[in-house]
Amino acid sequence: MSAWIALSLLSALAGATTSLTMKRAVARGGVVPSTIAYRLLAALLLAAIVASTGAWPSATPAFWHAVALVLPPESVGVLCMMLALRSGELSEVQPIFGLIPLFAMLGAGIVLHEVPSIVAAAGVVLLALGIYTVGLRAGRTALEPLRALARSTSSRYAVGAAVCFGATSVIHKLGIAAVGPLPWAVTLAVGSACALAVALPLVAWRWRIAGRPSHDRAWGGLVLLSAVGWAVQQIGLQTALRASQTSYVVALTSTSVVFASALGVLLLGERAAAGHRIAGSVLVGAGAALVALGG
């Protein structure tokens, strides 16, 4: 197995774990405190790793240009995802996130001139279809999430998040080229934590979703686990992006939806729409295999 494939799958598994722990942290301590806290802790963990491995690279104009480009879509993407999950049904919102690999493939082709092989491109499309299927729920038609775009604000928020995260995956390449994968992961963590610390309270006040920070040990432990998971996710993602095409890496890291679904069944007892989850997992697995073979 190529190193970038293993790193992408590691990132996917870590991302699924982060989703699981953050879901429980938000329930205990609210959206705003939990989100800001886990990003800041992840930044500290990543900075400690970089400090232990050597000197920080010089901040070139290319680096600052990449920072200026990545922070707006990263912050807006998090906000859109939060608003989508808050205001809409999961069966309408989650399938839309299957668009992220497609947006990443399109953006990488336009900006980075990365052209995927036919086999890998077919894998990306198949994987996106699988993610869409995993998010479907019993009693709903397969076209329900798409139809919801015309009437559901939450679905449009989900599309906004997918566009933003597709864009950030392309910009990551520029940051990695400027300072390397781990320093770029630190930059993303610190920058996004600071940006979200400013933006989230304003959004929370507008939509009344802040929640109250919890001071119990359970909340602190969940936030710490989320930070560790996100740090590992970023290490895997950024290192894999240095070694392979953006669309290939993003496609494989998007298998986190399947991992999250499996963890939800095993740990939280979420067994609704098992048929859709199994079918979607098969499609995601087949798509991931094609991406690995074509990449």
Image (cartoon, rainbow, N blue to C red):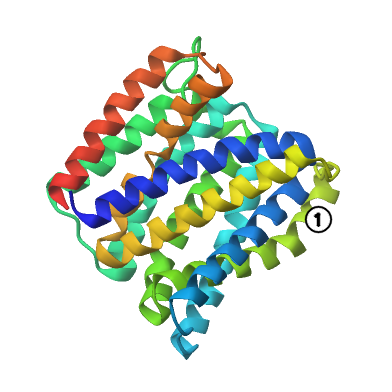
Instruction: Please say whether residue 21 is visible from this viewpoint.
Output: yes
The answer to whether 153 is drawn above or below residue 61 in the figure is: above
The one nearer the camera, 237 or 91, is: 237
Asked if residue 243 lies left or right of residue 11, the reply is left
The answer to whether 169 is drawn above or below residue 158 in the figure is: below
The answer to whether 85 is drawn above or below residue 74 in the figure is: above
Residue 158 x/y as whole percent: 55, 41
Residue at 67% over, 34% down:
24
Residue at 65% over, 51% down:
79
Residue at 48% over, 39% down:
16
Asked if residue 145 lies left or right of residue 124, the reply is right
Residue 40 x/y as whole percent: 67, 61
User: Disc 1 designates what residue?
Assistant: 201
The one nearer the camera, 124 or 110, is: 124
Residue 86 x/y as whole percent: 69, 35
Kindly state the secondary structure of the residue where label 1 is placed: helix
Residue at 26% over, 56% down:
4
The one nearer the camera, 274 or 90, is: 274
Residue 190 x/y as whole percent: 62, 69
The answer to which image quadrant residue 247 occupies is bottom left
Three-letter residue code for mark 1: Pro
Q: How many marks?
A: 1
For the residue carrying disc 1, how many other residues have a C-alpha within 10 Å: few (<14), some (14-19), or many (20+)?
Answer: some
